Amino acid sequence: MSWPSAIVTFVIIWWCVFFMALPWGNRAPDNPEIGHADSAPVKPRLWLKAGITTAVAVVLWAIAYYIIDSGLWSFREMVRT
C-alpha cells in the first residue's frame, strides 16, 4: 500500500468511526432556549469523541494496513478472477 492510499484509507476509517461515535452520550436539553433546536445536545463533547475516534481509527487502520500489505487479501487478485 502506498502512503497516499494509506492516508486516504485512514481518513475514511476515521470519518466512519467519528460518525458512529457522534450520537453516544448525547441528550437533549430539558428546557431549550428560544431560537435553538430542540434536539441540539447539551454537551456534545466533540474533543473527547474526536480523541477516542482517533485511537480506534489507528487500531483499525493498522489492521487494514497489515491485511492489505501482507497479501492476506489482495484487491488485485479479486479483479483477476
Image (cartoon, helix red, strand yellow):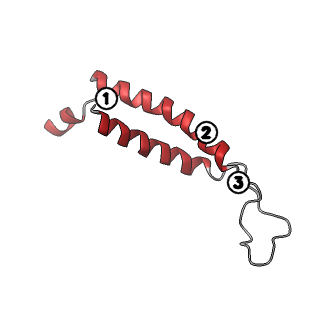
N-terminal-most mark, 1 or 2: 2
Camera-near label (3 vs 1) is: 3
The residue beneath circle 1 is 68
Looking at the image, the residue that sits furthest to the top is 70
Image side of residue 34 versus residue 16, left or right = right
| The C terminus lies in quadrant | top left
Looking at the image, the residue that sits furthest to the right is 31
Q: Are marks 2 and 3 in contact (CB under 8 Å)?
A: no
Identify the amino acid type marked 3.
Pro
Mark 2 element type: helix
Residue 2's x, y, as percent? 27, 33
Image side of residue 28 versus residue 79, left or right = right
The residue beneath circle 2 is 51
In the rendered view, would you say 68 is above or below 21? above
The residue beneath circle 3 is 44
In the rendered view, would you say 66 is above or below 43? above
Identify which residue is drawn at 30% across, 39% down: 4
